Image: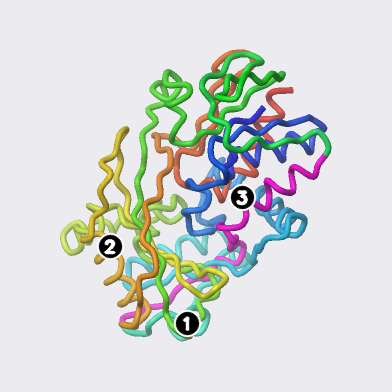
Amino acid sequence: MVVGAGIVGLAHAVAAVERGMSVTVVERDDHAVGASVRNFGHACITAQTGEALRFAEHARGTWLRLGEQAGFGVAECGTVVAARSGEETAALEELAELRGPDQVRLLTADETTSTAAVSAEGLHGGALLPRDLRVDQRRAAAAIAAWLTEQPGVRVLWGTPVLSVEDGLVRTGRGPLHGDHVVVCAGHDLDRIIPDAAEADGIRRCVLQMLQLRAAGLKLGPALLTGTSMLRYPALAGTEGARALRERWSEQRPELLAASVNHMLTQLPDGDLVVGDTHTYARTPEPWSSEELDELLLAETRALLGRDDLAVVRRWQGVYASADGEFLRTRVSPGVTAVAVTSGIGMTTAFGLAPTVVESLA
């Protein structure tokens, strides 16, 4: 039994089905409305390190296969990282030397503007990360859940709130459910179901402010990262260039660091841009959005693209589980395991993480 029909929960259901298990997925809402649909739809593979990189590489193949089988868009469009300072260029050069040309291809300023719709003003160059994927995040979870229900021995119970779990038992608002193993994939709401496990791992909520923008005629293509992204993604954040950039920004751009900005863009199938994001952390966050942070994202986007005609279509808050590590895997009891991606990379890694958890159950 899997609690939660977001991407992490669905990944565990897929992994279980592939190993011949019967699966019941229990979800409190009528469809996925959390982090699995509020994100960039970006599988950021190359910028990961360690276990996350291994999970991301495995997940890449699963995304491509599921996109075809379940009928949603997965594009092998890669990511362009724009460098607008010497420190950012140095960080990309360090990553290219570490990973090689198959994973990181350095770009001149002209190549960067021709590969992604970036303004040439102040641009030093960039890099293409060709192995990254673009997933249609607003369709993927629903399509995967529908595909799962077509597999033998699988059911997905929507609108079924989980009250508690124990070995072999999930108590729901619609009555008890029984099974051999329970995997709780409730994301940042793990503390609503297993508060002791969430507290022991220091789970808190990370709240993001994000925007959907309309830019007539703009064709972005790959995902687009900036210098702020170099301070967040570990393969780049560990470079000397990124460390020097953070040091300079602590004096010149403290507002970016204070808001933990990861300014990046992806493009939806209808052409609108998903733009974000800022980060605040608390166990119980305040419910208010900040117009100042939205304006910061808009100003950065106008400068990056060299366009003033960006219209805001939607604003929203994303929320994901955050902790000191990247992943939570806690065996709560012999028959109950709590799982969460606690670093905001669930789309990137879930389909690599889930097989390791399911195999451990067997």
Q: Left or right: where does residue 160 sit relative to residue 284? A: right
Magenta segment: does it hold 144?
yes
Mark 3 or 1 closer to N-term? 3
What are the residue bounds of the magenta stretch?
122-151
Q: Distance between the residues labelled 1 and 2?
A: 21 Å
Q: In this view, does 353 lie above or below 83?
A: above
Disc 2 target residue: 294
Identify the element where label 2 is drawn.
helix
Q: Left or right: where does residue 169 sit relative to residue 262? A: right
Which quadrant would the N terminus be assigned to in this image? top right
Amino acid on which disc 1 is placed? Leu
- Using the image, tell me which numbered label, if any, was put on residue 218: 1
Instruction: Report the front residue among 166 and 47.
Output: 166
Number of the front mark, 3 or 1:
3
What is the x, y in percent for residue 253? Answer: 20, 62
What is the x, y in percent for residue 100? Answer: 58, 63
Mark 2 or 3 closer to N-term? 3
x 61%, y 50%: residue: 141
